[in-house]
Image (tube, rainbow, N blue to C red):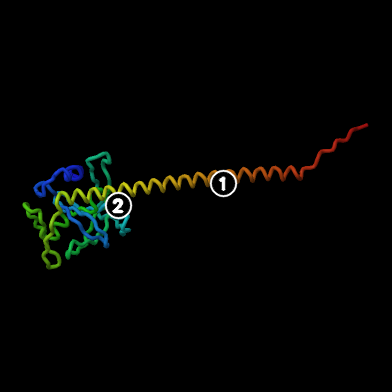
């Protein structure tokens, strides 16, 4: 599903919602983020990148489980959760999300969220109607071009972060190497001083020749 999401959206030049999952934008701690709403998921998910960036408090998962990715990562254990507060317009909510390494979007709201909020999805317009705290809300999806633009922006940010991180690692590695060489040189100089000091106090041997 994630591969189809990343690869197929930008190719659709029409604004039809026929083949589109519900995408939108939301606010999480005053940061603009990109969620997906899809009933095809049995869980709510949050990306590890978002948790790290916003410094969320991680809680143990009450029922850890295995998740099988359709890529080289293979199987992974999902054993952590986080509470994510978010808002879409006037709709404000908080949802428990399982933490996974997800790059397609920041949060993924699946069946648990849809069940709790009594979601009704319009199959033609892809609009979502929900009820929260006695108030009815209607959420509108992004167009395919908006989705493609958001995904490109997210990719550029990831690439920039990875570039900065790699530069930092190289700098730290050089600093450690330089520090190690300096320490080795200091130890060698110290050893030489000790040898010279011992030689300075050494007394010459006197030989007595018997006559």
Q: What number is the disc on residue 210?
A: none
| Real-space CA distance between mark 2 and mark 1, rounded to the nearest whole angstrom | 37 Å
Q: Mark 2, residues whose alpha carbon is within 10 Å: few (<14), some, or many (≥20)?
A: some
Question: Percent from the top left, x then y, of residue 64?
Answer: 26, 51
Where is residue 203, by image quadrant?
top right
Q: How many marks?
A: 2
Q: Nearer the viewer, residue 97 or 28?
A: 28
Q: Is residue 181 left or right of residue 208?
A: left
Query: In this figure, which residue is indicated by the disc labeled 1?
Result: 183
Q: Nearer the viewer, residue 67 or 172?
A: 172
Say which quadrant the N terminus sits in. Answer: top left
Say which quadrant the C terminus sits in. Answer: top right
Q: Name the secondary structure under disc 2.
A: helix
Question: Percent from the top left, x then y, of residue 201?
Answer: 76, 45
State the residue lying farthest toward the front.
13
State the residue lying farthest toward the top.
211
Q: Name the secondary structure under disc 1.
A: helix
Q: Mark 1, residues whose alpha carbon is within 10 Å: few (<14), some, or many (≥20)?
A: few
Q: Is residue 9 left or right of residue 59?
A: left
State the residue lying farthest toward the left.
124
Please say if the residues under marks 2 and 1 sit with CB atoms less than 8 Å apart: no
Q: Earlier in the sequence, mark 2 or mark 1?
A: 2
Question: Percent from the top left, x then y, of residue 151?
Answer: 22, 49
Q: Nearer the viewer, residue 185 or 69?
A: 185
Question: Percent from the top left, x then y, of residue 98?
Answer: 24, 53
Query: In this figure, which residue is indicated by the disc labeled 2?
Result: 49
Where is residue 96, by image quadrant?
bottom left
Q: Residue at x 23, y 45 (%)?
A: 67
State the residue lying farthest toward the right.
211
């Amino acid at each position: 599903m994630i591969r189809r999401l990343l690869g197929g959206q930008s190719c659709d030049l029409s604004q039809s919602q026929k083949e589109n999952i519900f995408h939108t934008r939301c606010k999480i701690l005053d940061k603009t983020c990109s969620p997906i709403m899809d009933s095809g998921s049995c869980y709510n998910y949050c990306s590890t990148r978002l948790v790290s960036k916003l410094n969320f408090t991680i809680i143990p998962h009450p029922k850890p489980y295995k998740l099988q990715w359709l890529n080289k990562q293979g199987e992974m254990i999902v054993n952590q959760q986080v509470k994510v507060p978010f808002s879409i317009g006037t709709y404000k909510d908080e949802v428990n999300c399982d933490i996974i390494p997800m790059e397609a979007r920041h949060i993924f709201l699946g069946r648990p969220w849809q069940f709790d909020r009594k979601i009704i999805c319009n199959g033609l317009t892809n609009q979502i109607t929900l009820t929260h705290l006695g108030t009815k809300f209607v959420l509108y999806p992004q167009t395919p071009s908006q989705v493609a633009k958001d995904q490109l922006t997210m990719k550029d940010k990831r690439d920039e972060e990875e570039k900065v991180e790699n530069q930092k690692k190289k700098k730290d590695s050089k600093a450690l190497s330089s520090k190690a060489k300096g320490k080795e040189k200091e130890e060698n100089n110290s050893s030489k001083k000790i040898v010279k000091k011992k030689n300075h106090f050494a007394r010459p041997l006197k030989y007595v020749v018997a006559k």
